[in-house]
Image (tube, rainbow, N blue to C red):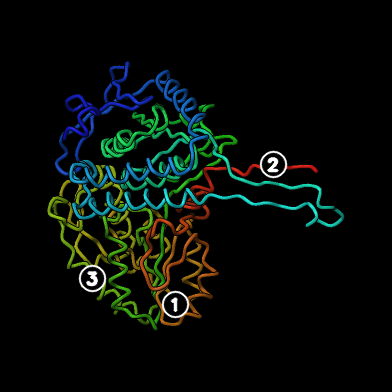
């Protein structure tokens, strides 16, 4: 499509700096391979440190003007970007399907959801407000001082989305940053870069000032530290692995951080639960996008007395899943690469070797692994604690509520958990004891709606996301005191 012609030259995609799509002077290209056919389908630039310096300088200069741009004008440009995403949805969906193996329906949902997020952010942004404080509120003071308290932008925001949601998780970072008055440097994921560049083009074409939104490509191992430590970066918002997040935290110094990292989300099922609904939610939560989601259901903690019943219902739901091509809207598609598939297979084999029972047969064709339900998983198995990021669901049988809470909290992660019970009092009591950012009651673990707070504890991250929360994270309080 002509709308996207300028972002590429043949199979080579460019990076965006100061309103121009350019090829890197390094003459180095990174080849990308589709997880569907393991075929070379695109190349991205490997930008240099000097080019990153140019990007940062452009962002800084653009932000100095943008911070004084009226809020309603910022919002209008966001609305235009959202409209362009929807208008060019079909082309972006094709890229998502081919590049990250996302089922077509899920890819369409991601683009439309992202447009909704941007529009919502625009409306939320114009409602940024401050407050007036009086000095006589504090004992011993007269009303001779007034504090005008408002929020101001941080400067240049470095945004790093992951491969699995390169559009939506770019939108959740870029839109709040821009409406808050910041400039953005988007470091695309390596796999997922082409999708992210298509997203950026919608903002570029919407008419944002040159330099306000920039996109750089390259391997994180080569330019990641340089970006994170760059003196022009005022704030970092990242979604990805815990290992990378920890490295960012160590390198970032005093920069504010918003880190969305790994998870080992547990679903706890009690005897009074609606087992049919629990099974449907668990299977949907575990196997959507082949389990390649930080909020995927990654273990089920079920009371012994109902474990057999729940297992059978889960197996029945799993048998309804379609394995195949994302073009055909299959539920289970190829994992992102061979390393990912090898890791999932290793966790399954380790559990089986240590006595776990595979309730569905292990089948693998290249990087496609059919959904596997593993029963009788114990705490000695890697599958009980490791995040697989693939289509495998471990069932851990527990003898008591306390046992379930202990195992749920025993993970290094603390993203989300789910509780299935008809007893709301019990659910509320247990939710207070589980150390996670969000507890879902009678529903699967999931991100969203996008204006809800999204956060984790322990190794699952730092900071809170969600439209209003992200705007607040990307601004700081500034106080003006008037002395009378």
> Residue at label 1?
399
Considering every residue shown, the one lying at the far left of the view is: 328
Per the image, the residue denoted by label 3 is: 315
Residue 384 location (% of width, % of height): 39, 60
Q: Residue 337 versus residue 17: which sits nearer the camera?
A: 17
> x and y percent of residue 143 in the render?
81, 52
Do we see residue 388 in this rendering? no
Q: Are marks 2 and 3 in contact (CB under 8 Å)?
A: no
Disc 2: which residue: 480
Q: In the figure, residue 28 lies in which quadrant?
A: top left
Of label 2 and label 3, which has the lower sequence position?
Answer: 3
User: Of marks 1 and 2, which one's residue comes earlier in the chain?
Assistant: 1
In front: 159, or 243? 159
Q: Which type of secondary structure does the marked residue at label 1 adopt?
A: loop
**Callout 2 crowding tier (Cα within 10 Å): few <14, some 14–19, many ≥20:** few
Residue at image position (34%, 77%) is 307
Q: CA distance from mark 3 to mark 1?
A: 22 Å
Give the mark nearer the N terminus: 3 vs 1: 3
Q: Is residue 315 left or right of residue 259?
A: left
Count how many numbered circles sit on residues in the image.
Answer: 3
- Residue 431: percent from the left, percent from the top? 50, 70
Q: Quadrant of the C terminus?
A: top right
Q: CA distance from mark 1 to mark 2?
A: 59 Å
Vertical order, 343 against 359 (above or below): above
Mark 2: secondary structure: strand
Image quarter of residue 330: bottom left
Report the disc number at residue 428: none
């Amino acid at each position: 499509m002509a709308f996207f012609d300028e972002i590429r030259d043949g199979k080579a995609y460019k990076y965006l700096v100061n309103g121009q799509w350019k090829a890197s002077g390094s003459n180095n290209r990174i080849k990308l391979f589709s997880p569907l056919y393991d075929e070379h389908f695109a190349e991205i630039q490997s930008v240099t440190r000097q080019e990153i310096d140019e990007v940062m300088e452009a962002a800084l200069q653009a932000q100095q003007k943008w911070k004084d741009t009226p809020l309603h004008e910022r919002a209008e440009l966001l609305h235009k970007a959202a409209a362009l995403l929807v208008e060019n949805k079909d082309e972006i969906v094709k890229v998502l399907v081919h590049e990250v193996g996302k089922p077509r329906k899920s890819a369409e949902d991601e683009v439309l959801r992202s447009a909704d997020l941007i529009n919502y952010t625009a409306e939320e942004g114009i409602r940024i407000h401050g407050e007036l404080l009086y000095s006589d509120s504090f004992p011993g003071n007269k009303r001779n001082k007034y504090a005008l308290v408002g929020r101001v932008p941080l400067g240049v925001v470095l945004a790093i989305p992951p491969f699995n949601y390169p559009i939506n998780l770019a939108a959740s970072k870029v839109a709040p940053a821009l409406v808050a008055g910041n400039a953005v440097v988007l470091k695309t994921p390596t796999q997922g870069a082409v999708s992210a560049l298509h997203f950026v083009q919608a903002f570029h074409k919407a008419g944002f000032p040159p330099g306000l939104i920039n996109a750089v490509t390259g391997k994180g191992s080569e330019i990641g530290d340089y970006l994170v430590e760059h003196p022009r970066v005022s704030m970092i918002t990242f979604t990805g692995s815990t290992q990378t997040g920890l490295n960012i935290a160590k390198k970032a110094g005093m920069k504010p951080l918003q880190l969305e990292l790994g998870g080992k989300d547990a679903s706890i099922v009690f005897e009074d639960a609606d087992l049919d609904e629990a099974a449907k939610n668990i299977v949907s939560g575990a196997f959507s996008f082949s389990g390649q989601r930080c909020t995927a259901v990654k273990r089920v903690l079920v009371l012994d007395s109902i474990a057999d019943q729940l297992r059978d219902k889960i197996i029945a739901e799993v048998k309804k899943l379609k394995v195949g091509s994302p073009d055909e809207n299959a539920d289970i598609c190829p994992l992102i690469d061979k390393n990912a598939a090898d890791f999932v297979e290793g966790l399954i084999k380790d559990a089986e070797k240590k006595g776990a029972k595979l309730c569905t047969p292990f089948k693998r064709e290249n990087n496609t692994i059919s959904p596997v339900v593993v029963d009788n998983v114990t705490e000695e198995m890697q599958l009980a604690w490791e995040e697989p990021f693939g289509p495998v669901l471990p069932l851990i049988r527990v003898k008591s509520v306390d046992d379930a809470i202990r195992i749920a909290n025993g993970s290094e992660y603390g993203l989300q958990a789910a509780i299935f019970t008809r007893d709301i009092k019990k659910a509320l009591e247990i939710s207070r004891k589980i150390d996670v950012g969000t507890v879902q009651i009678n529903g699967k673990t999931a991100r969203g709606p996008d204006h809800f707070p999204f956060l984790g504890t322990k190794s699952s991250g730092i900071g809170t996301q969600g439209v209003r929360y992200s705007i607040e994270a990307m601004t700081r309080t500034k106080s003006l005191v008037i002395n009378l």
